Amino acid sequence: MSKVSWKSEPEEHDYPAATAYLSLIAVAAQTDDLVGRLRTAPVEYHKAKDILRAAGLPLLSQDDPHVASDLRKISQNTALSPVLLVRGDLSNGDPLQIADGYHRVCASYHINENTDIPCHLVDRADRRG
């Protein structure tokens, strides 16, 4: 069984990808705020199975082209980029948002559902203390 290796920080192209996704579910000012805070958020670790459950997303097949690409990287011991997450809100049923890295989470799950994935995690602006 392969072990998933991770880069210490997300790649620069992950942030525009997160912006593109978040712009579909948030206004521009909120998207800009979230992505700005994702850039400086500390790394925390969460298990692949917990990320998928909290996001309410299905596990993508190993045949998905992006998951397959990440699985090839894992087998070649190429480090993957940490994922970018926006915390959900249990009180009103808002799921965790995987702003960037859904395919990496799925690939990691296929290797081991208990894979500890490095994440940059931020709260929505309306949930910050």
Image (tube, helix red, strand yellow):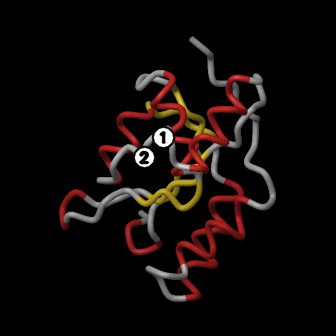
Task: Tell me the amino acid under the disc marked 2.
Answer: Leu
Mark 1 highlights which residue?
106
**Tag on residue 60?**
2
Q: Is residue 110 above or below residue 42?
A: above
Q: Quadrant of residue 94?
A: bottom left
Taking depth in this image into account, of 117 and 77 the one nearest to the observer is 77
Q: Is residue 88 above or below residue 112?
A: below
User: Along the horizontal axis of the image, is 66 left or right of 5?
Assistant: left
Query: How dense is the environment of label 1, judged by Cα within 10 Å: few (below 14), some, or many (20 and up)?
Result: many
Residue shown at the point (19%, 67%) measured from the top left: 92
Question: Residue most toward the top?
Answer: 1
Residue 79 image offset from top left, x and y in percent: 75, 31
Q: CA distance from mark 2 to mark 1?
A: 6 Å
Residue shown at the point (78%, 29%) measured from the top left: 78
Q: Quadrant of residue 107?
A: top right
Asked whether the residues under the numbered discs 2 and 1 touch, taking CB atoms below 8 Å apart as contact, a structural biologist would say yes
Q: Secondary structure at mark 1?
A: helix
Viewer-side label of 2, 1: 2
